[in-house]
Image: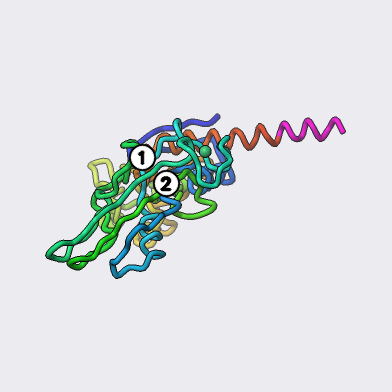
């Protein structure tokens, strides 16, 4: 049975333990989070004026990489939108504008100066530098943000980190341990503690499987044994800020679920022929 235990959770970061699954499942979930959960990103730019030192293409590329707050409930992917228009409509496109001019001294234009038409579809941070303008240089443009997937371009990835590791298992054999304390000193994660009853372990979940404790143990056979549980995974996910991290996970599960049910439907159809 699958069990989930959440260790840490904020809007941007989540760490949880999943037990009762295998590597293909954990990896499918990771890859869907990376490449298939849709997010908003600036996809097209109309440059009305650009006298900065960055040429139009570089400016457009930089704007594309700004994480944009995403509203998955109000917008649809352009390829799934009923409008079928190349330009898009209010359901598949969000407009932002940028107008900046340096008057008497050099200035930096930040993402906060992008003015969204819909305040829910705005840059995640106001402090991302876009371009520097020297006196009398101007930038005036319209930007269109659309939903997209990481499979097409990394700018549509909702996560800046999405990893999993096996659950570590740290065991001390009290019979062969002579409480020399070498493992206590060498462990970078401070997993071992010296107590009156001998060496004990704490926060095993932090173990990075570096094996320094095993190398440091002078006993033969070794008193410390490091292994891992290949049915339990520790996931670490960090959002770019476009979507709350919990939403990214639930969307990924929905996508995986849909893939499986589509497969099963197709299989039933195939049988009838
Ligand atoms: Zn549309």
Which residue is at a point 25% across and 48% down the rendered structure image? 112
Query: What residue does disc 1 label?
Result: 121
Splitting the image into 4 quarters, where does residue 136 fall? bottom left
- Percent across and percent down for residue 228 are 48, 47
Magenta-span inclusion, residue 266: yes
Left or right: 223 as drawn, with respect to 187: right
Rendering coords of residue 82 (x, y %)? 58, 35
Q: Is residue 149 above or below residue 210?
A: above
Q: Are marks 1 and 2 in contact (CB under 8 Å)?
A: yes
Element under label 1?
loop
**In magenta stretch: residue 205:** no
| Location of the C terminus (image quadrant) | top right
For residue 262, which quarter of the picture?
top right
Total marks shown come to: 2
Residue at figure coordinates x 51%, y 48% from the top left = 35
At which x and y percent is residue 66? 35, 52
């Amino acid at each position: 049975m699958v069990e989930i235990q959440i260790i840490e959770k904020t809007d941007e970061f989540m760490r949880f333990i999943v037990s009762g699954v295998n590597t293909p499942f954990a990896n499918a979930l990771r890859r869907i989070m990376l490449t298939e959960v849709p997010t908003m990103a600036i996809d097209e730019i109309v440059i009305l004026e650009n006298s900065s030192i960055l040429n139009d293409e570089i400016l457009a590329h930089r704007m594309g990489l700004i994480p944009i707050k995403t509203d998955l409930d109000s917008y649809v992917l352009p390829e799934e939108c009923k409008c079928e228009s190349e330009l898009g409509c209010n359901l598949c496109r969000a407009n932002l504008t940028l107008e900046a001019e340096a008057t008497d001294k050099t200035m930096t234009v930040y993402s906060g100066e992008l003015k969204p038409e819909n305040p829910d579809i705005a840059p995640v941070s106001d402090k991302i530098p876009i371009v520097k303008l020297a006196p009398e240089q101007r930038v005036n443009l319209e930007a269109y943000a659309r939903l997209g997937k990481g499979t097409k371009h990394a700018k549509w990835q909702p996560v800046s980190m999405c990893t999993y590791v096996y659950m570590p298992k740290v065991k001390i054999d009290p019979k062969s341990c002579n409480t020399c304390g070498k493992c206590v000193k060498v462990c970078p994660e401070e997993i071992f503690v010296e107590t009156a009853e001998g060496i004990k372990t704490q926060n095993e979940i932090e173990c990075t499987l570096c094996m320094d404790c095993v190398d440091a143990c002078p006993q033969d056979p070794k008193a410390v044994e490091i292994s891992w549980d290949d049915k339990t995974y520790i996931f670490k996910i960090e959002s770019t800020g476009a979507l709350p991290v919990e939403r990214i996970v639930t969307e990924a599960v929905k996508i995986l679920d849909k893939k499986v049910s589509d497969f099963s439907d197709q299989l039933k159809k195939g049988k009838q022929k």
